[in-house]
Structures are given as C-alpha cells and as structure tokens.
Amino acid sequence: MSTVSYQGIPGSFSHMTACTLFGAGAQLFGTSQFREIFERVSAGIDDAGVVPLENTLAGSVYENYDLLLHHPLQITAEHYLRVEHHLLALPGKSGDERIRCLSRVFSHQKALEQCQLLFREFSHLECSVHNDTAGAAKLVVDRADSSLAAIASEEAAKLYGLQILRRNVEDDPHNFTRFVVVSRAAVRVVDANKCSIIFSLRHQPGSLVRVLDVLSRRGLNLTKIESRPIAGKLFEYNFYADFEFAAGQAEAALEEISANTQSLQVLGLYRAAHS
C-alpha cells in the first residue's frame, strides 16, 4: 500500500487530488504545512507527496518552488484540478440576506485571493486566513457561530455538514490548480513528454537568452518560467522552467542547457496533464 502525504484535511483540494491520483488503496496523511510533505517524503516516511505549484488565478505557490530546490525529490506526475469554491456556513437561512449577516470568512490564503469579487460585493466581510480550505470549513462547525463562513469545496460541505450559501464564488470559472507528485526516487515514465528543471546562470549579459535559445532551436515548448531570489546573492536568481518534448529530445536538450548554466537540477521527466 502506498503512503501519500498532502497538505490539509479530508475535503481539501489537495486531498481530492491525492484520492484521484492514488485511489482508495493508498494510505493518505494530511499535514498542516507544505514543508512537512517534503520532510516526510525525504525521510522515507511516505512514498510520495502531492503539492500544488500554481493556480490560474492566484499564480505560483512560491513556497513549494523553494522547497523543491532544497529537497532531493523528483516530480513524477502532474494533475490539473478544476477548483470550484463555495461559500459555506452553518445550516440556516439562505440567500444574500444571510451573507449580509456574516462577519468573517475563513479559507486558505490562495483561495481567498481567488474570490476577490465576492469580497467586493460584500465589503463588510473580513477575510481570515486558515491552513487549508477544508480546515476552514471544520473550524466553522467547531465554533458553532452562525456569523462565520468558509470558502471550500462541495466535498467539504458534505463532510462537515455545512450549507452552501453561494456556489462558484471564484473570480473566473476557468480556475485550475496544477498539482505535482513528488517522490524520493526517479520513476521512469515510459511516455514522459514534460520536464521540470531548476537552473542558475552566470551573472553576465545574455545568459538567460542562451538557455531559451536551446529550447527554441530544438522546437521545445516552454510552458513556464519562474525566477526566485538566491539567498545571499544580491539580485541573482534561480530559474524554474517546464518544457514539453517529444521522444528522444530531452537528453540532448538538457546536456546543452547544462553547458549554458552555472548549475542545473532536473526535477523530473513525467507525463503532461491536460485540463
């Protein structure tokens, strides 16, 4: 039986993703912090971990990009989850009149960022950050206060007995989160067509262009590039990049990229997900 860690509790989007990827046969363990996932998998406590890397509305989860750099783990799969946020509260009256009686809304920071139109419409509502969306739903139940609400999934509403006051409060319906699976050992994916890397560059003109030129000349599709500051180095950065490739293209491209970088870490070769 596989053991898999995720951030949050049952009903969270990470939990839903872990269930989809590993099925009912896996033993799932929820953590309170993302770093605990990396620590548990690195230590061999869990076989794999499921972590979010980016959202189409709120952008990148920078903490997890930094954790990828500092832990010797490999990305072995990715999954795009359609994220539907609902406003949940204790059972009772419904409609906008009920929402106007609320005072505070709990959820994960990224979920709150994805629902700004709701808070513009009901400007009296106070945002309160919680570790995860499902945990916010459970908090509302535990406090038994009808003035409190949570933004979470329909699954969380069912699990914790909450009423959905308004469905799909995300700012845009095209709201997806990209999750990845991390593990200690590289898993050979026969049909891999996507690669994730971290690299640093010599602090000189044209260094990034030379790396991007490798991908361009070889016809490889760059799907993401992200920079993060290097601690202790003034305005120097690590770059995180994803690119798609066809069979036989990755090895030669990585060799050429390595020749044009100061350091290169391959995070994984895996099958690209599709929305």
Image (tube, rainbow, N blue to C red):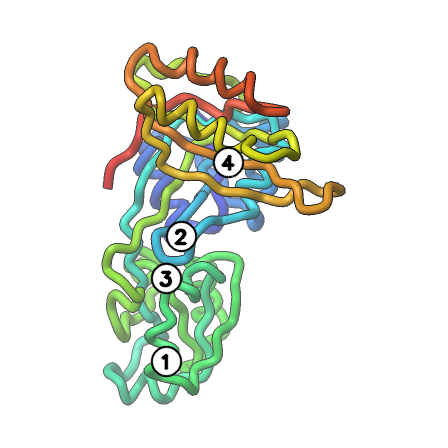
Identify the residue shown where x is 56% and y is 50%.
Answer: 32
Observer-side mark, 4 or 2, equals: 4
Identify the residue shown where x is 31% and y is 50%.
Answer: 176
Label 1 amino acid?
A: Arg
Q: In this view, does 91 lie above or below 213?
A: below
Which residue in the structure is indicated by mark 3? 152
Q: In this view, does 121 lie above or below 269?
A: below
Contact between labelled residues 2 and 3, with CB atoms less than 8 Å apart: yes
Q: Earlier in the sequence, mark 2 or mark 1?
A: 2
The residue tagged with tag 3: helix, strand or loop?
Answer: strand
Q: Earlier in the sequence, mark 3 or mark 1?
A: 1
Q: Position of residue 150 (x, y in %)?
A: 40, 69
Observer-side mark, 3 or 1, equals: 1
Identify the residue shown where x is 37% and y is 80%.
Answer: 120
From this viewpoint, is residue 3 visible?
A: no
Which residue in the structure is indicated by mark 1? 120
Alpha-carbon span between mark 3 and mark 4: 30 Å
Residue 240's mark?
4
